[in-house]
Amino acid sequence: MSRIKLLGENIKRYRELKGLTQAELAEKLDFSYEYVCRVERGQKYISLRKLFQIADILGIGINKLIDFE
């Protein structure tokens, strides 16, 4: 599986653990709902800046999002 797909799965997992919907996460990040959907499906590359924003909203370290083991 590609790393971008694994990243998306990690974002989805931690978003769900936080109890947020994709729409709620998108709103908190000022991203479009479609953008969040595509990131979680591994269809969209994401900048490091945006990755840090996601980690901050989810209340986790960025290392958890990029842990692919």
Image (cartoon, rainbow, N blue to C red):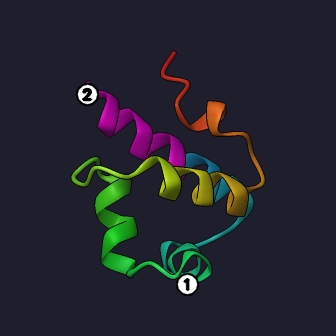
Quarter of the image for residue 37 reads bottom left
The local crowd at label 2, few if under 14, some if 14 to 19, many if 20 or more residues have their Cα within 10 Å, is: few
For label 2, the residue is: 2
Kindly identify the residue that appears in the image at 71 percent across and 57 percent down. Answer: 56
Quarter of the image for residue 35 reads bottom left
Residue 44 place in picture, x, y as percent = 25, 54
Chain part drawn in magenta: 1-12
Residue 51 place in picture, x, y as percent = 52, 51
The local crowd at label 1, few if under 14, some if 14 to 19, many if 20 or more residues have their Cα within 10 Å, is: few
What secondary structure is the magenta-colored segment mainly? Answer: helix
Residue 69 place in picture, x, y as percent = 51, 15
Residue 41 place in picture, x, y as percent = 30, 52
Could you tell me the amino acid type at mark 2? Ser
Q: Dot 1: what SS?
A: helix
Image side of residue 53 versus residue 60, left or right: left
Kindly identify the residue that appears in the image at 38 percent across and 54 percent down. Answer: 40
Outermost residue on the front side: it is: 49
* Residue 6 belongs to magenta span: yes
* Residue 41 belongs to magenta span: no
Decide which of 64, 48 is in the foreground and name it.
48
Image side of residue 26 versus residue 16, left or right: left
Q: How far, Cα to Cα, is label 1 from label 2?
A: 27 Å
Kindly identify the residue that appears in the image at 34 percent across and 56 percent down. Answer: 39
Image side of residue 63 versus residue 35, left or right: right
Residue 13's place in the image compared with 4, above or below, is below
Could you tell me the amino acid type at mark 1? Glu
For label 1, the residue is: 27
The tag on residue 41 is: none
Q: Dot 2: what SS?
A: loop
